[in-house]
Amino acid sequence: MKLGVLDQSPIGRDEDAGTAVAHTIALAERCDALGYHRYWLAEHHATPTLASSSPEVLIARVARETKRIRVGSGGVMLSHYSPYKVAENFRMLELLYPGRIDLGVGRAPGSDGLTAAALAYGNPLGIEYYPAKVKDLVAFVSGAKAFTEAFGNLEATPKTPTTPDVWMLGSSLDSAVYAARFGVAFSFAHFIDPGPAAPAMQRYRRDFEPGPRDEPYASIGVFAIATEDPEKADVFRRIREIQRQRRARGVLGPPPTPEEALAHPFSAADIERLRAKRSRQIIGSAQEVRAAIDALAQESGADEVIVLTITPTFADRVRSYELLAEAYSGG
């Protein structure tokens, strides 16, 4: 099983964005040495706890600091942007780091409505144009004729002997349908919505039409933490559950401390409700995490797994990726 990383550049308590980005670079270097296959940078806007607002810029730095791992976006929120400009950005990255660049795209706003409006800055095209944007993007990236007739003679520059690997990201059947129709790889975000994972992956493989890729190829994105300490595992679960409660109330901010998580008074109703959502996260020993990931991969038919890990300390985060790599290498 090939393992990858999804990094949202989380800003820890009493840390700033500079520290978060430094952690991203250090983690990428460590995961490169551990044998991880991909390292994806996320796109989030106006989110005070995440520093990952510009994956294209971080990709360039991470690729420079690593040697063999593929580096890409997980993903670029194409609904905001010009497909032509996105293609140019990623063709330039491919020119700088040939054979190592992934272009993952999604249609979620990655922001609130006001921020989305600022990103579009007057662009009148709505989400209904997303499929056309994807078609044009794939064409511009691969050097094919654009879908939009007015752009038929345009070619994105720079010219490159290789092209980025295009992925469609999503957490619904719609995303699976688009990925199959356009002939690109598909990554399902299980950590956002675990329910449709298997049906979406099956739909993708069933309906796949050759395009840039001749055969279907898919990954599943999971939230997972591996730890050698069962007490820490319980704390990590509590922290995630408290954050879910806060998000449901529209409260944004840093995660609770371990002490706050242990002291939090969960009601019986809270526990019952939160247990129903626990399938979104995999937390436990390295072998427990591997067993759960393997079961998900088998159920969904995933070719790869992309792992998102956020912990109270950077040391715990690095250790989780180390333990998972060891579990898969037999170490």
Image (cartoon, rainbow, N blue to C red):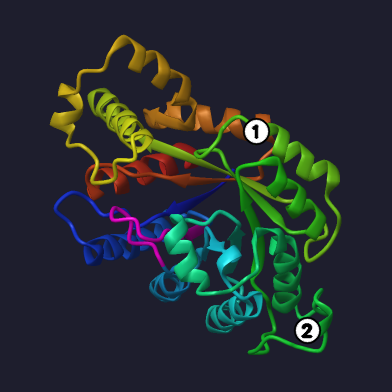
119 relative position to 29: left or right: right
Q: Residue at x 15, y 30 (%)?
A: 260
Mark 1 residue element: loop
Q: Residues within 10 Å of mark 2 (few under 14, many from 20)?
A: few
Report which quarter residue 90 is drawn in.
Answer: bottom right
In-front residue for pair 66/299: 299
218 relative position to 272: left or right: right
Q: Residue at x 81, y 89 (%)?
A: 153
In-front residue for pair 280/225: 280
Amino acid at circle 2: Phe
311 shown above or below 271: below
Amino acid at circle 1: Pro
In-front residue for pair 125/43: 125
Q: Residue at x 66, y 45 (%)?
A: 303
Disc marking residue 196: 1
Q: Position of residue 276 (x, y in %)?
A: 47, 19
In-front residue for pair 281/328: 281
Region in magenta? 38-53
